Every structure is written in C-alpha cells, then in structure tokens.
Image (cartoon, helix red, strand yellow):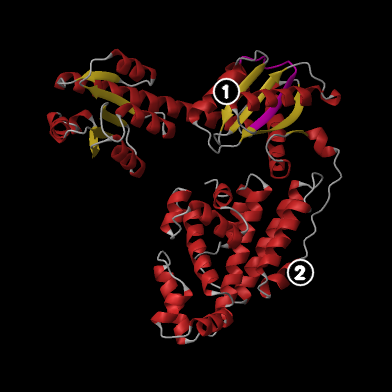
Amino acid sequence: MKKVMIVEDEELILQGIRNILDWEALGLEVVHMAHDGTEALQMWEEEPVHIVVTDISMPEMDGLTLLRKIREKEEQVRFIILTGYDEFDYAREAIRLEVENYILKPINEEELERQLRETVRKLEEMDKKKLRYIDEKTQWMHFLNGKSKNEEYGKFAKMLGLEEDHGNYCAAVMKWNMEGFKEKKITDVIMELKKESRMKIVHLPPDNLLMILADSDFEEAGGGVQEYFSELQNQIESRFDIMTFIGVGPSFQSFEQLPEAYRAARKLQKYLIIEGYGSCLSQGQIRSRKTEDIRMDETQLRKLILKKEKEAAVDYMEDLFINNVRKEASAGSLYQTAVKMAMLLQDIKKEYKLESDRFYDLTELIETIFGADDILGIKTAFISEIIEIIVCLHEEDSQYTPVVRQIMSEVQQNYKEDMNLKTMAYKYHMNASYLGQIFQKEVGCSFARYLSNTKNSIAKDLILNTNMKINDIARQVGYPDTSYFYRKFKQCYGVSPASLREMKKY
C-alpha cells in the first residue's frame, strides 16, 4: 500500500480531501496531514511517503518549494498540485518540476481519484523497472564472477552489442565517492559515458561501481590504455563535479576472457585506500612497485595507551597512517597493520576488563577497516577507540569520593544544562578551588574537560548510530553554537564531526 501526505493550510479543505475518497480502495494510506510546507517537510523526514497532494499557496513554505526540497532527497516521490489560482506561471513551474497533475480548486472528486489511480500505476511501473534493473545487475555479477555456463556468454555479448569470439577489448572498473551523490547524477554520468561509441557500460552493485568495456586497439605496454581512461576520468570529474577511482584491467581478445579481466580490474579497487579518489591505476603500475611494509611499534602504542597519554597516542596514529604510508605501500600491508592494531586494542580491553557500550567489538572494527574508502576512515576509527579505552582506564583506576561520584552522575544526567565548577561547589557546600583539586586528582581531568568529554562522547554515538544532522546533534548535547561544538569535538577526538560521519559510509 502506497503512503500519502496531504498538505493544505485551510483545515476545512484538508479534512475534506481526507474524507471525500476511499483511500484504502485505491491502495493508498494517508499517513500525514500538514498545514504548510515546513510542517510537511518535517513529517516527510520522519516518515517518507510515495505521493504528496499539496496546495501551492501556503504560509511558511509553499507547495512548489516543498516539492523541490523533497525531490532533493528522493526523486521518485510523486506530487499532485492543488491551487485556486489559474495562473500560467504556476502551471509552467509545476510541469517543469514533473508533477503528476495540476488541479484547480474547487476539487473535482472524480478527477482527483483518477489522478491518484494514474499515479499509483506510474509508481508500480517504476517499481517493476527497478526490479528488472536489479535482476539484470544480479545476472551480470553472476557472469563476471565466472559462475555462468559457457553457452550463456553469447547472451551477455549480445547485451553489450559486441562480438563474442573476437575483438580487442579492455575492461576497467570505476568507483565514485557517493557523498552528496544523487540518483539523477548517477544516471547523467552513465548516459554521458554511453555516448562514447567505443565504450560499453554495465552498472554493478554497489551503486557507485561501473564496469567500463572499451572496444579498442590500445597496446597496454605503450600506456595507451592508461592515458585513455585517465582522460575519461578527467572529463567525468570536471563535468559532474565528482571524484572517481579507476582500476584498469588487462586487454583481452575473446569475450569469454571478460570475467577474468573484470576481476583483475576489481582487485585494483583495494588500492583506493592508499591512492585516494582522483587516481587511475593499472596492473602494470602495481607490478612495477617495490612493496614497502608499514612498521607499527605495538609496544610503544600499548605503552602510550596504558599511561593514558591521549595526545601522544593520537599523534602516534597521525604519524603512522599519514606520514608513514607511502604510495609504494601495498594495500595488503595497510590492512595487515590495521588488523594487528585492532587485535592489540582488543587485547588491552580484555586484559583490563574494560567495558563500554561505546566500544567497537572486534568484528565491527575490522568491518570498519575494510569498509573505509580512505586512510582517514581507518585512522578516525582507531583514534575514537583509543580515546574511549583511555577514558575507561581513567574510570577504572580512580577511587571516587562520594561527592565526586555525585557530580559525575549529575553530569551524565544533565550534561545539556549550563554547568560549571562554581555551581557544583555551591550546590555541595564546598570551596570551588578545593573541589576542583580533588576532582582533577580522582578523575584525571578538570571538571570542564570531563563535562566536554561527556558531551562529545554522546555526540559521537549519535554521529555513528543515527542519521541526525550535525547541527541537531550539537544542540542535543548542549552546544547551541555549532562551530564551538566542532572545535571541542576535534579537541577531544582529533577529527571533526563531519570526518567521523564519513567513515560510517553509512
């Protein structure tokens, strides 16, 4: 059953639209009724709908603005526009924004019902098309992973319009950074690539992966393939304002060799972690490298953590992942180092019986490592984990006096409020200077730092485990000024809130 939202600023009309139709008989469910665009947008963000029936002229936010804002988030939402103004400009703008229809008030019940039925039909066609698209991608992955029978090869060659038995081809795999990337832009990129006559495109799962098959006379040894795909990359990135990584596989002559060539190009994607977006890498370049191992001093890192030297531990991570990882390092060496570090942190947590719902478990941490697009994501995950370990070590080592325990408990419960050491001292009838000294001695940091760390720890959980906006998270933990929140968060974890969210990939 498709979900519907009705938006109308006049309550009588709003209720009338709700009651004039048998929505269930149309296969529809009205889940939201809003009085203006601002309220409607908030409702849609809490629970998206498939169809929006909205007035144009409303306070706060009009219907066309609402349409544009929702379409930025989800292009498949269908709109039926209602208005009492028979003006060409409204109709022209509505048509440009691809609404289902433009209906004048007073509303004709039969016309509205007809338009809703037509909209449901269009949505069902879109769903079927999406399922066919998913099925086709699944078949391609089955073929490219070498699981198809030889007699099926001709079908895939035909799908690409290529000769099965002869030719001169080169396969590459292109991945793009999905941040801020909308489905329409994906379509635009694919359509632009398909204009190139010597090129065939297959869009593969995940959504940010393309196999590009060039029908060419390139000689890989002469660098022609590399130059071709590098130039293609430059054109795509400049035109669509995106960042890509291309792995170029070996040339081949027979279509039956495509799966092997694809897998070779796909394996090169692991070098994104070192090369970063904007790079185009071929097998020849990897073979010519002299692999350098990444040296990690496990004893030194362990010592910094157990001595609770947070800043030194963060600096060590920066030096390890940023300064010591060269282009010549292999992706395998990087992952091996990261897994060793994950095991080290797990051993420390077990040895000292540290428990926190903010810790990664070992599986989660390793999944984060292999799911990261770049070194920043790996570094961020480890810094976050190391800081949580140090915080727990401080808590485990301290024997708190009753007043310090009370203050810590109050911070955990009321961290959103405007709290400071003076108000705490007044509340517990103590000298502020003396209270500050015993708090520093027992907890290992000042009251202000403890309050800040508590807020930032809760903010970190919200960043990693929810889709809340950063601005909303700042207010949620008691930072009305977002820029101040960014500064305090980065002081605590060594990375900005936005950088921490990037590693989630969410």
Q: Is residue 445 visible?
A: yes
210 in magenta: no
Between discs 1 and 2, the one toward the N terminus: 1
Determine whether 430 is above or below 252 in the image.
below
In the image, what residue occupies the spot 47% across and 62% down? 458
**Callout 2: few (<14), some (14-19), or many (20+) C-alpha neighbours within 10 Å?**
few
Q: Is residue 501 left or right of residue 257?
A: left
Query: Residue 283 lies in what quarter of the image?
Result: top right
Q: Quadrant of residue 336?
A: bottom right
**Residue under the point 48% across and 85% down:** 431
Q: Which residues are magenta?
A: 161-174
| Residue identified by numbered label 2 | 300
Would you place residue 413 above or below residue 87 in this image? below
Q: Residue 492 got which mark?
A: none
Residue 173 within the segment the image draws in magenta: yes
Camera-nearest label, 1 or 2: 2
Give the CA separation, mark 1 to mark 2. Answer: 49 Å
Q: Nearer the viewer, residue 240 or 490?
A: 490
Task: Tell how many labels.
Answer: 2
The residue depicted at 61 percent of the width and 14 percent of the height is: 195
The amino acid beneath tag 2 is: Gln
**Residue position for label 1:** 190
- Could you tell me if residue 353 is visible in this image? no
Q: Secondary structure at mark 1?
A: helix
Q: Secondary structure at mark 2?
A: helix
Q: x, y (%) of residue 290?
A: 87, 45
Q: Name the kind of residue labelled 1 in the image.
A: Ile
- Residue 440: x and y, percent? 57, 79
